[in-house]
Amino acid sequence: MGALAEIPDRTARGYRVDLGKTSRKIIVYRDDDTVRGFADACPHMGVPLPWNADDYMSPDGKYLRCANHGALFDLDGKCVFGPCKGEALPPIQLEVRGRYVWLLT
Ligand code: FES
């Protein structure tokens, strides 16, 4: 998908992944040398979280935030505040190999 260095530590970045005839937007959250992946689709309405590119984090940096109605997600993707509380961002399996982020299928 991209180099780990493209993602500042303890922040998230969005990647569009080509799946042949379709594509999918994926959130990649980096914590040092590990990453967590989620579909960029808020469980409230199924729309992308940010209004501006890569603007996924809450101001305190502790949560992923949906700009649409203010939902907050912990770093495991579970909604802890907002209209989808108790639901979760769909997880995406990723792996870091050789300082690059790989999508596992
Ligand atoms: S679309 Fe995300 S909180 Fe409503």
Image: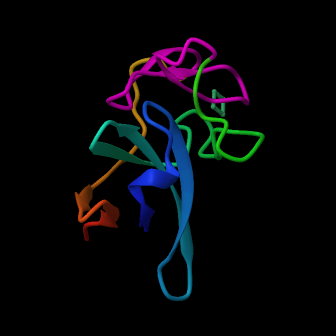
Q: Is residue 73 magenta?
A: yes
Image position of 26 with respect to 74: above or below? below
Residue 10 sits in which quadrant? top left
In the image as oriented, which residue stretches furthest toward the bottom? 20
Asked which quadrant contains residue 96, the reply is bottom left
Is residue 77 rendered to the left or right of residue 63? Answer: left
Asked if the magenta segment contains residue 90, the reply would be no
Magenta span: predominant SS is loop
Quarter of image, ligand 1: top right
Camera-side residue: 99 or 56?
99
Q: Looking at the image, which residue is at 27% across and 56% down?
A: 93
Name the residue: 63% across, 30% down: 66
Q: Nearer the viewer, residue 16 or 30?
A: 30
Image coordinates of residue 46 in percent, x first then y, are 59, 45
Q: Nearer the viewer, residue 1 or 84?
A: 1
Left or right: where does residue 97 sit relative to residue 68?
A: left
Along the line of sight, the residue nearer the viewer: 3 or 63: 3
Q: Position of residue 99 (x, y in %)?
A: 30, 60
User: What residue span does the magenta drawing correspond to?
Assistant: 59-83
Q: Position of residue 33 (x, y in %)?
A: 27, 43
